Image (spheres, rainbow, N blue to C red):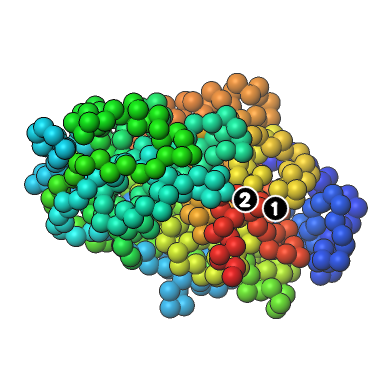
């Protein structure tokens, strides 16, 4: 209780400064005219009053319910997931928000397909000389047919395309205009190594380094297949990870356009054998790929593949609501808040506790999203732009719900000024730091810094940008379609504890509970931090909704081109 009272006190203190928000119940003064030198938090009195109704206990009760065993782990396409979606929609309705899903409902249907590559699949590399290499599934290769057909055949030349990247902003093009239509592309994981922050962001991973980008680019170029060469050091994870995440059923959005018949990985040893049987050396190829002057190489080898898949269609829903903006001139523009509500569901074959409750991952984010929706809905005055709330599905299957939302947004992507996402916000007490990795890449960053300062939260930099965490949560799906987007979370420093305590909490969570049935609700959890993150996000969202102009990515950022395109 003490901590809670402390928070309210701090927040009141924060907002007792000069009356930049025009005081009382008067309408917010748009900052349009005031040429801004140092940004400061511009919230009207009613917004502050609404913000102050956000409490840890409101979030607690949502987390308690959503992570209850009766919700069976909120599995995508499972009953518990649908119950969670219905609960969230009911809350939205109670808060007075308007439906923003399909046909005047809160539900946006997300069509999904589960693909299992069956044992009848054959995958053979036919080199220039020597014998055909019939590869062993899982040990030597993994492959999915992304066309979502029960059977596909490929017999095509293999072209080595280096990293498979075309990035004009870094003056990098592995394809050099080569016609690779109908070909199978052999490529390396990750991106050209560099310490120069202006070149593929130095050590930090950009989206170009992710295998998803490589598949997508190959599709855009008209290729029929991709073979990624796994190298542990470059991938930053061992073959076992590739093997485990590519065996059994894998979920995809129902395909809407061209796709790869073969999306695959091969073991490094296989790649070496293929190279030498083709009269080449893999080491030399990897070396060549690090040069700007690299050109695609037809290896004189081919892939013969017969893909046999079990294809299972199912569906789930994103839950979407809107609070219309108060200013008719910009009410067609919006801020969006996102949090995924799905988790891994229930695994009946597993002995013992087999319910993946996902209390932290991500009932906490949903609790925050719902509390934000309630606070905005209850405010007698609304921000100028509209506010969207989206509880998305199938995050654990590969950000699929948010990918669908990004492709089918209720408000056009070019008119969404900002996405603030919440994913796995641990209930550990009062934070002294905030993690907003990616915010520094947007034009909104000065306001983020000023707001963090007013909330007395230090901004914690991403400790391992090379791990590419930015690409692993739902805000990334919005960034891909150009929307300035980032997640809000606590840092590592909590009130009354040294930093080592926070780091230790995280380590224990990752080791013992992350993606395990033991990620459960306990009454002694302290949701003060979740409440603080909600208040911070409330202030940011309100500010973004009232800014004179839409937010963008910094010029030259990897998402800037998508932003520009979405606004043409
Ligand atoms: Zn997760």
Whether 322 is drawn above or below 541: the answer is below
Numbered label tally: 2
Whether tag 2 and tag 1 are in contact, CB under 8 A, the answer is no
Q: Residue furthest right?
A: 18
Dividing the picture into quadrants, the one containing residue 549 is bottom right
Image coords of residue 99 (percent x, y):
51, 72
Q: Residue at x 77, y 41 (%)?
A: 453
Q: Is residue 526 visible?
A: no
The residue singled out by tag 2 in the image is 556
The residue nearer to you, when weighing 429 against 267, is: 267
Dividing the picture into quadrants, the one containing residue 241 is top left
Dot 2 alpha-carbon crowd within 10 angstroms: few under 14, some 14 to 19, many 20 or more: few
Q: Secondary structure at mark 2?
A: loop
The residue singled out by tag 1 in the image is 443
Side of 145 relative to 415 (left or right): left
Side of 97 relative to 52 (left or right): left
Dividing the picture into quadrants, the one containing residue 356 is top left
Position of the C terminus by quadrant? bottom right
């Amino acid at each position: 209780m003490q901590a809670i009272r402390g928070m309210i006190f701090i927040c009141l203190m924060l907002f007792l400064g000069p009356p930049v928000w025009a005081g009382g119940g008067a309408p917010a003064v748009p900052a349009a005219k005031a040429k801004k030198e140092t940004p400061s938090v511009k919230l009207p009195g009613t917004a502050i009053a609404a913000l102050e109704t956000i409490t840890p206990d409101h979030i607690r009760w949502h987390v308690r319910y959503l992570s209850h065993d009766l919700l069976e782990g909120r599995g995508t396409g499972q009953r518990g997931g649908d119950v969670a979606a219905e609960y969230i929609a009911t809350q939205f309705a109670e808060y007075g928000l308007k439906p923003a899903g399909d046909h005047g409902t809160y539900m946006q249907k997300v069509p999904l397909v589960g693909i299992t590559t069956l044992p009848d699949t054959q995958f053979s590399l036919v080199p220039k000389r020597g014998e055909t290499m019939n590869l062993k599934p899982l040990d030597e290769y993994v492959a999915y047919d992304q066309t979502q057909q029960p059977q596909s055949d490929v017999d095509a030349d293999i072209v080595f395309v280096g990293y498979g990247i075309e990035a004009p902003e870094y003056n990098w093009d592995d394809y050099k205009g080569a016609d690779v239509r109908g070909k199978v592309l052999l490529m390396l994981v990750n991106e050209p190594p560099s310490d120069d922050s202006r070149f593929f962001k130095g050590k930090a991973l950009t989206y170009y380094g992710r295998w998803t980008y490589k598949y997508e680019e190959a599709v855009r170029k008209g290729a029929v297949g991709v073979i990624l060469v796994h190298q542990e050091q470059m991938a930053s994870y061992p073959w076992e990870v590739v093997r485990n995440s590519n065996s059994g059923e894998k979920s995809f959005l129902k395909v809407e356009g061209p796709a790869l018949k073969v999306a695959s990985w091969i073991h490094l040893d296989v790649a070496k054998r293929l190279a030498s049987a083709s009269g080449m050396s893999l080491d030399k190829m990897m070396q060549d790929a690090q040069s700007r002057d690299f050109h695609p190489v037809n290896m004189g080898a081919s892939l013969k593949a017969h893909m046999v898949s079990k294809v299972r269609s199912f569906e789930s829903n994103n839950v979407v609501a809107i609070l219309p903006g108060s200013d008719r001139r910009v009410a067609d523009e919006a801020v969006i808040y996102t949090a995924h509500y799905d988790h891994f569901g229930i695994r009946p074959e597993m002995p013992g506790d087999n319910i993946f409750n996902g209390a932290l991952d991500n009932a906490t984010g949903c609790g925050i999203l719902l509390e934000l929706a309630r606070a905005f809905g209850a405010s007698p005055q609304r921000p100028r732009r509209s506010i969207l709330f989206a509880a998305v599905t199938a995050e654990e299957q590969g950000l699929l719900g948010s990918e669908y939302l990004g492709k089918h947004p209720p408000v056009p992507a070019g008119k969404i000024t900002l996405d603030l996402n919440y994913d796995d916000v641990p209930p550990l007490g009062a934070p002294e730091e905030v993690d907003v990795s990616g915010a520094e890449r947007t034009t909104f960053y000065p306001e983020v810094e000023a707001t963090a300062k007013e909330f007395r939260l230090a901004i914690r930099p991403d400790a391992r940008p090379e791990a590419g965490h930015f690409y692993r949560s739902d805000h990334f799906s919005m960034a891909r379609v150009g929307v300035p987007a980032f997640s809000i979370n606590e840092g590592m420093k909590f009130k009354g504890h040294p930093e080592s305590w926070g780091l230790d909490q995280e380590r224990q969570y990752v080791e013992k509970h992350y993606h395990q049935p033991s990620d459960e609700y306990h009454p002694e959890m302290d949701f003060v931090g979740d409440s603080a993150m909600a208040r911070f996000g409330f202030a940011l969202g309100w500010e973004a909704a009232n800014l004179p102009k839409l937010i963008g990515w910094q010029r030259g950022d990897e998402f800037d081109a998508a932003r520009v395109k979405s606004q043409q």
